[in-house]
Each structure stands twice: as C-alpha cells, then as structure tokens.
Amino acid sequence: MSSPDITDLERQAVLDVLNTPILSIGPRIQAFEEAVAHYAGTKHAVSVSSGTAGLHLCIHAANVSDNDFVLTTPFSFVASSNAILFERAIPIFVDVDPITGNIDPTLVEEVVSDLMSGVESAKKWLPRKGWNIENGAQPIPLKAIIPVDVFGQPADMDPITSVANKYQIPVIEDSCEAIGAEYHDRKAGTLGDMGIFAFYPNKQMTTGEGGIIITNDDAAAEKMRALRNQGRVQGDTWLSHKFLGYNYRIDEMSAALGEVQLSRIDELLEKRDRVANWYNERLANITGIEIPTIVDSTTRMSWFVYVVRFENHVNRDKLINSLREQGIPARPYFSPIHLQPYMVDRFGYQPGDFPITEVLGSQGLALPYSGVMTEEQVDYVCDTLINSIR
Ligand SMILES: *Cc1c(COP(=O)(O)O)cnc(C)c1O
C-alpha cells in the first residue's frame, strides 16, 4: 500500500549511530527534537516511541483520568480514541464534515455548550452505557478535545479552539497524518495546546516506529518528558522515579533517521503532491468515483493517503477483489471507531449513531500511495480501477 522514501543519507546516519556506544538517550534524540521544534515553531518537542504513545502522554498532561469525558471523532485511526480509554476516561464522539471527514466544528460547539449546561442536556451526546457521572456533576467533566487532521488535511480548528478557550478545555491536535500541512497558513500540530506527529513507515516521514509531541506549554512538556522516561524528572537518578511512568522513549537510530527525513521534508511532501496530482488527473472525471476535496482553509495539503469515494451503485468489495486479482492492494478507509467490537461492547454503539462517519467509511477506498510511486504505476492502478468499475 505504501513505501518509505529512504536514501543513502538515512542509511549513513543510522550506521553512524551504530558506530558509537550510545544507542539511546543521546545526542541524536536531542538534535531531532530541536529540529522538529524549529520546524513547527514551538518551544518544545518531546520525542516518543510512537504516535499512540504521544497521544497517551498528552492525555496525561491534560489531567484526564477516571470517568472524565473527552470529545473526539469516530472517523480516525483507533489510536486517537484508545488513548482516552487507556486512562479510563470516556470518548464522546462527534460526527464529521462530509467533505473533509474532519470533526464538524459546528457540532463541537453545540455539544460543548450542551455538556456545560449539565447532565440532562448532555445526555443525548453520551454513549448509551459505560459511563458514570459522579454526584450528577454539573457541568460534566469534559477534560479535553481531540480533533484529528484526517488524511493530511487540517481540521477546522479555529471554531474548535475558540469554544475550548471559552471553557478552558485543552485541545490536543492529532496531526499524526498531517506533518507539514497548513491551516490558514499556520502549521498543523500547532493549532491546539499540544499536537502529535507520527513516524510509522507509511507516514509522510518515518523513524521506523516513533512519534513526537509539540507544545508551547512548559509544564506539560516537563511532565511528558518525565512520563516517557519511567517517571524520572530532571535530576533524578536511574533508580529514582517521581511519577508512575512508561518507557515511551525513541532510540538514537530512529532519531538519526528522523533528522535526515525531516531535513528532506519539503522534498518528501512535493513528491507526494506529484503522485496525488497524477491520481487526480486520471480519476477526476470518472463516473462513480469522487476524488479527494481540498477545502479553502487548507493552505497546504500534506498528502498522507490517497482515498477515493465511490457512489452507491459501485460495489466496493467486488472492486477490491478485482484489483487484488490484478496485483493491486486497496483498503477501505477508515472503519468507524464506534463500531469496533470493543467499543460496541463497552458503550453500546449501534449502526446509525454517526451517519456521516458511516457513509464515509462505507464509500472510501485507499489506493496504493507513496512519494516513490512512478507515473507508470499510477497509470496501471488507474487503468485497472477504471476498467473494473465499468
Ligand atoms: C498513525 C496515526 C496515529 C499513531 O500511530 P502510531 O502507529 O502509534 O505511530 C495516531 N492517530 C492517527 C490518526 C494516525 O493516523
């Protein structure tokens, strides 16, 4: 489905680390963090072992815990919701904009205002079961909002941060799919109080496994640095631990790889732009297929995946099989989070609860995509797709 873009520069950087005795907690991690903070224009960058680990630490830094509520989107990769469950808090899902697949800001404003008015007006937004509001708390404890920049297009963040600021609710921007994207000329990941980039090999840039949190919040950054390193704070020795922490550290080889990838980020994003444009040109006027829409607020798209939508008369499953028989992998994208078996068990969700998410989930198909694809490969995918649809 995808392929990383690795050159001799990356290979040499990793090899250079392996020629030293320092494979973790060393100079490459520090340099990588400085480079990411400089790129994003934030005070802090805290590297971690995955995007999911980054989300989890942000949840901690926002003081989310038992029976708290966090508002987020059901149209995402599961990690953005799982991080809420890790701390025994309850996700409140809000449906998405049908064009971008990003959380609907108008609904966010409405839900937040209803939650702030107390349990009775909040109830219609809460899951059928699986939550417990202590002593009928008023307003209900909404501790964070997690918008996701889906497929590399920033969420409509201004109305979201404005309602969040009004009630002093931290905003954690899941930019794991959107490094380099811009919203009204501001960088994705910097639009809330904390943001996360992820570096799994299918992302725009990779460290193998890895992720990084960016923030201007000194206290949050310090807490997250401690929590990723077994709860040690600055000055603690190897066996003294102020907090219950984790091992969420990235290693030196990965950080060295990340430094080189980040130094090539404009090139990487341009190559991805080129491949997305090849797809757009070939698929723009095909009956039954809708190509991705970039909205005006997205002043720079950072293509993460190339997802087309099919009109209802197209049988997606048959199409996937037909593509597979001709050597082309393709995947439905995303599968709604609220309908994952563990979410249904725990919160009683049913089909129909988030209709736009479900429609997008049933119509979307991710095609093979990466910055190293050739025009001939895109031709082959598109020709095969078009013939199969007819
Ligand atoms: C990739 C991704 C993550 C984090 O992924 P890791 O594999 O843990 O690095 C989180 N949220 C979204 C939306 C993602 O696409």
Image: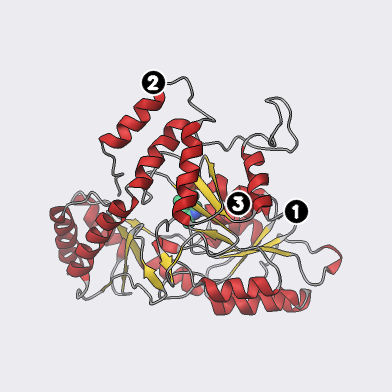
- In the rendered view, would you say 368 is above or below 336? above
- Do tag 1 and tag 2 residues touch (Cβ < 8 Å)? no
Of labels 3 and 1, earlier in sequence is 1
What's the amino acid at mark 1? Asp
Quarter of the figure that contains the C terminus:
bottom left
Name the residue tied to disc 1.
Answer: 66
> Which secondary structure, mark 3?
helix
- Separation (CA) of disc 1 from disc 2: 46 Å
Which tag is nearer the camera, tag 2 or tag 3? 2
Please give left or right for residue 76 compared with residue 162 in the image.
left
* Disc 1 residue crowd, few under 14, some 14–19, many 20+, Cα 10 Å: some
Please give left or right for residue 83 compared with residue 148 in the image.
right
Question: Residue 248: horizontal and vertical position, in percent?
Answer: 57, 38
- Is residue 294 among the parts visible in the rendering? yes
What's the amino acid at mark 3? Ala
Name the residue tied to disc 2.
Answer: 19
Name the residue tied to disc 3.
Answer: 83
